[in-house]
Amino acid sequence: MDLLGTIGTGTIFALVLVVLAIIIVMKAVRAVPQGDNYTVERFGKYIKTLTPGLHFLVPVIESVGRKINMMERVLNVPSQEVITKDNAMVTVDGVVFYQVLDAFAASYKVNNLEYAILNLTMTNIRTVMGSMDLDQLLSQRDTINAQLLHVVDDATTPWGVKVTRIEIKDITPPRDLVDSMARQMKAERLKRAAILEAEGERQSEILRAEGAKQSQILQAEGEKEAAFREAEARERLAEAEAKATEVVSAAIASGDVNAINYFVATKYIEALKEIASAPNEKLVLMPLEASSVIGSIAGIGELAKNVFGEKA
């Protein structure tokens, strides 16, 4: 009976030792997953950082202090109200992208890393956007993002953190301000439409004036050409009359009476033609010397006979 009790006690003790050994081995062996870093503490003091892979610790003496995610993470910035430089109240929210580069600094140089980054970002959003007008806030988001990134990244560098991007998601002005901006935009559109319409009418008037000018120029050119042609015709007529006068004068000098009759009859007939073609004359009276006209025509015929007879 005493032997059985002794064997049972020994077995229990051995089982306890085996369990303790298993626990010690589990505490001594650490597998760090990819994307994480573990800090190691010896009696509560940091001594080293474990990178991804299998590691061995001294049981009881060494332990894992902090488990840090080394991958890039996203932190949502909640909405907050910001007063702009021109006293406009707007509601702003955003998002922050950051990555831990130094596990030791992120673990032991700041308490609650995400909370610290969040409050730092919200404070700088109010500072940066509060120094700008509303129009600048709505039109210069890239500038705002760049300024926030520069300030927050410099502030978080001692914490072993790299802030990669800060983006402002929404900027919401008050409802009455939105309505006012809509009316302003409508007025601007109407103004641009009126300017374009006036510019179109101006261009149309210019084109019409140019067309009228070109038409007058062409008309003047035509009248000039017609006057030139008319003058040329008159010149040739004058030359022909001069030539005829010269021929008649030569005939008179030679004693040919028929030439005189031809010259007088021609002028007489032209005068009668002008009298008959006058638009204000309804009745044409032949002169009393109509027989002279007939005699002149007979003289022209006699002259033609003499000329053709000489040629024959």
Image: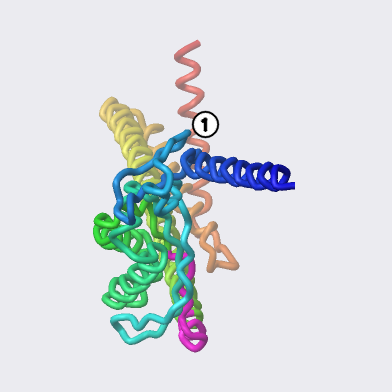
Q: Position of residue 224 (x, y in %)?
A: 34, 47
Please tell me which residue is depicted at 46% across the width and 13% down the height of the picture: 311
Q: Is residue 45 above or below residue 18?
A: below
Q: Which of the 4 quarters of the picture holds residue 92?
A: bottom left
- The residue segment tinted magenta is 168-181
Q: Which of the 4 quarters of the picture holds residue 231?
A: top left
Which type of secondary structure does the marked residue at label 1 adopt?
A: helix
Q: Amino acid at mark 1?
A: Gly
Q: Is residue 172 magenta?
A: yes
Q: Position of residue 208 (x, y in %)?
A: 45, 60
* Foreground pick, 170 / 276: 170
Q: Is residue 88 magenta?
A: no
Name the residue beneath numbered marker 1.
301
* Foreground pick, 120 / 190: 120
Please tell me which residue is depicted at 43% across the width and 65% down the height of the picture: 168
* Foreground pick, 197 / 310: 197
Please tell me which residue is depicted at 40% across the width and 68% down the height of the picture: 115
